[in-house]
Amino acid sequence: MTIVIQELPRVRHFVGALVDASVAQWSALTDLNRQAMTELFNPDREVAATLPMTLVASEGERLAGFVSLRAETMGAVLHPEAYLPGAGPWLSNMWIEPWARGEGLASRLSLALEGKAKMIGASRIYSSTERPDSLYHKLGYEDLECRQLNGSTLYIIAKDINAAEVF
């Protein structure tokens, strides 16, 4: 089977799995409980050409990964001092299921999301990572600032997408 990427409203049955993965991965960075996280991934809030926007990768009925484009990064909820106020949109919530890792899916999702950002008029997209040699850097993101968050270095990164190819 082939992994396909679709917008969340088309595959709303994955919302529970997206929430579970997000709570497990990012609950320390936000003050969002499960209910609030569920609202973040409400497919009825996601209307074409608006934010938030979530892309879901799946192989049949098996979730492979997801990524969101948000006006504000989810980490800014609890730690606004660690992010850039007023900057956006943000590539946020990248998650790849363990079985789907190592096959380039994170790159595919990132590039597809950049294409969506460009379609809604964004000329730059932001993200953050704890790694100085992240996948995002390989995709052309550049460091803007390094900040400290909970004893770790957080790289605030951005990519100009005016000239980026749309996938």
Image (cartoon, grey):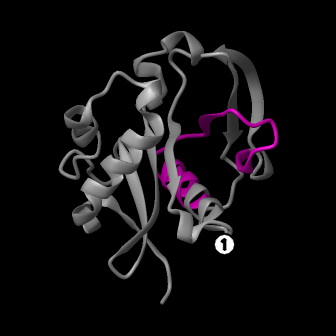
Q: Quadrant of residue 165?
A: bottom right
What is the total number of numbered labels drawn onto the structure image? 1
Any part of residue 49 in sight = no
Residue under the image location 41 percent in, 31 percent down: 27
Residue at far top of view:
81
Q: Which of 90 and 81 is in front in this view?
A: 81
Residue under the image location 45 percent in, 26 percent down: 28
Q: Is residue 16 above or below residue 154?
A: below
Q: Does the magenta stretch include residue 66?
A: no
Q: In which quarter of the image is residue 83?
A: top right
Residue under the image location 46 percent in, 21 percent down: 76
Residue 141 appears at what percent x and percent y? 74, 41
Give, as a single range, the part of the protein colored magenta. 111-136
In the picture, the quarter occupied by the C terminus is bottom right
Q: Which of 67 and 30 is in front in this view?
A: 30
Q: Is residue 85 above or below residue 156?
A: above
Residue 130 appears at what percent x and percent y? 69, 32
Residue labelled with disc 1: 103
* Crowd band around label 1 with a 10 angstrom C-alpha radius: few (<14), some (14–19), many (20+): few
Residue 155 appears at what percent x and percent y? 71, 27
Any part of residue 166 in sight = yes
Residue under the image location 42 percent in, 58 percent down: 55
Q: Which amino acid does label 1 sit on?
A: Glu
Q: Nearer the viewer, residue 161 or 33?
A: 33
Q: Is mark 1 on a helix, strand or loop?
A: loop
Residue 136 appears at what percent x and percent y? 71, 47
